[in-house]
Amino acid sequence: MDSESRAAAGLLEALSRASEIFAELHHPFARSRPFSYYVPPSGARIGTVFTLPDGREVSFTVSISTSADAWHVEGEASVEDEVLIELPRKSTPDVRAGLAVLDAYVGEVAAPSIRLLDGLLDGITGL
């Protein structure tokens, strides 16, 4: 397998891992809907959206895209227009480094999800 094929396989593996992690996020008091989609011209966005009992949507997402000379990775958690977590955009010239950042960002966005949802739900119930 040539280096471009290995890079493509690595990208597919990383996107699959991210999709699996976000699909496993659940909360007993908020409906969840995992998603992944293509972002033109050469990117992907993966995450999960939770719908709170008051109808607000909370999203946990990561994205990866390319430009002529770099891979770009971003991560965020937000409720409606309020950003809860915003990871800085990181750009790397190498696909392997970009995929390492993607894996790290998935963990950083997903790990606090239940705690953040609990805080938002407490705000609804007034506890």
Image (tube, rainbow, N blue to C red):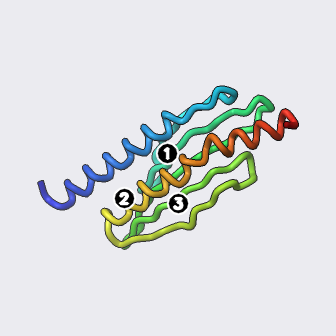
Residue 74: mark: 3
Where, by quadrant of the figure, is residue 115 drawn? top right
Mark 3–mark 1 Cα distance, whole angstroms, equals: 11 Å
Which quadrant would the C terminus be assigned to in this image? top right
The image shows residue 37 at horizontal and vertical percentages of 48, 43
Amino acid identity at mark 3: Glu
Amino acid identity at mark 2: Leu
Mark 3–mark 2 Cα distance, whole angstroms, equals: 12 Å
54, 9: nearer the viewer: 54
Mark 1–mark 2 Cα distance, whole angstroms, equals: 14 Å
The image shows residue 112 at horizontal and vertical percentages of 60, 48
Residue shown at the point (72%, 46%) measured from the top left: 79
Q: Secondary structure at mark 1?
A: strand
Residue shown at the point (75%, 53%) measured from the top left: 82
Disc 1 packing (10 Å; few <14; some 14–19; many ≥20): many
The image shows residue 60 at horizontal and vertical percentages of 59, 46
Q: Mark 3 or mark 1, which has the lower sequence index?
A: 1
| Left or right: 51, with 26 as reference point | right
Provide the residue designation for mark 1.
Answer: 46
Residue 114: mark: none
Nearer the camera: disc 1 or disc 2: 2
103, 74: nearer the viewer: 103
Disc 3 packing (10 Å; few <14; some 14–19; many ≥20): many
Q: Mark 1 or mark 2, which has the lower sequence index?
A: 1
Q: Secondary structure at mark 3?
A: strand
Residue 99: mark: 2
| Left or right: 54, with 73 as reference point | right
Q: Mark 3 or mark 2, which has the lower sequence index?
A: 3
Where, by quadrant of the figure, is residue 56 drawn? top right
Amino acid identity at mark 1: Ile
